[in-house]
Image (tube, grey):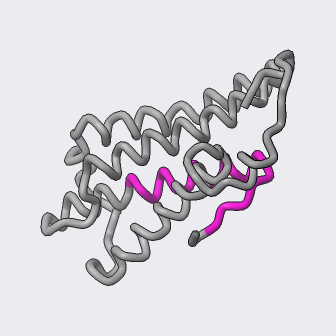
Amino acid sequence: MKSIDTQIEFDFDLAKEQSEKNPVYYVQYAYARMNSILENSKTKIQKPKFKGQNFNLLNHESELKLIKYLIRWSEVVEDTAKDFEVHRIIGYATGLSSVFNGFYRDCRVISDDKDLTIARLGLVIAAKNVLKEVLESLGISAPEYM
């Protein structure tokens, strides 16, 4: 999480801790939560159709913040490739997890409004795909369940 020119003190207890204080656990938990939302949606909506879906329904502040954060991923990759500041990717992973958790807190994904539910499920799928790519780029597993 720190720049390569920063002195690091490794905390073994923190590395083993299963809480939001441990950045790896925090990011993996967010990924597992995304998977859980998608699994729960299967009982409510059989095979949602995303093609032709009205994603303009995503206008809540937390939805827009998540969309904007997801768009930044390619920029983070490009910048990291230029200057090898790998800690930027870890910062992005924890930031994405935090923004997603805010979205999850503020916006009920599965609701009685089928169109809004499908649009939000599409956003969860996008977040899950990006976070999986981030985790893979760091060599960290992306657990489906925790």
**Image vertical order of residue 143 relative to residue 73, above or below:** below
Give the left or right position of residue 32, taking residue 13 as reference. Answer: left
**Image vertical order of residue 78 relative to residue 18, above or below:** above
Residue depicted at 54% across the width and 64% down the height: 32
Residue 76, percent across and down?
A: 64, 29
Residue 91, percent across and down?
A: 63, 32
In the picture as drawn, the residue positioned furthest to the top comes out as 5
Camera-side residue of 106 and 54: 106
In the picture as drawn, the residue positioned furthest to the left comes out as 112
User: Main SS type for the magenta part?
Assistant: helix
In the picture as drawn, the residue positioned furthest to the front comes out as 13
Camera-side residue of 39 and 70: 39
Residue depicted at 47% across the width and 53% down the height: 126
**Image vertical order of residue 55 relative to residue 46, above or below:** above
Residue depicted at 59% across the width and 50% down the height: 27
Camera-side residue of 46 and 1: 1
Split into 4 quadrants, where in the image is the C terminus? bottom right
Split into 4 quadrants, where in the image is the N terminus? top right
For residue 41, which quarter of the picture? bottom left
Residue 131 falls inside the magenta stretch: yes
Give the left or right position of residue 51, taking residue 14 as reference. Answer: left
Residue depicted at 40% across the width and 39% down the height: 67
**Image vertical order of residue 126 relative to residue 50, above or below:** above
For residue 45, which quarter of the picture? bottom left
Residue 12, percent across and down?
A: 81, 47
What is the number of callouts on the image? 0
Give the left or right position of residue 40, taking residue 118 as reference. Answer: right
Residue 144, percent across and down?
A: 59, 70
**What stretch of residues is rendered in magenta?**
123-143
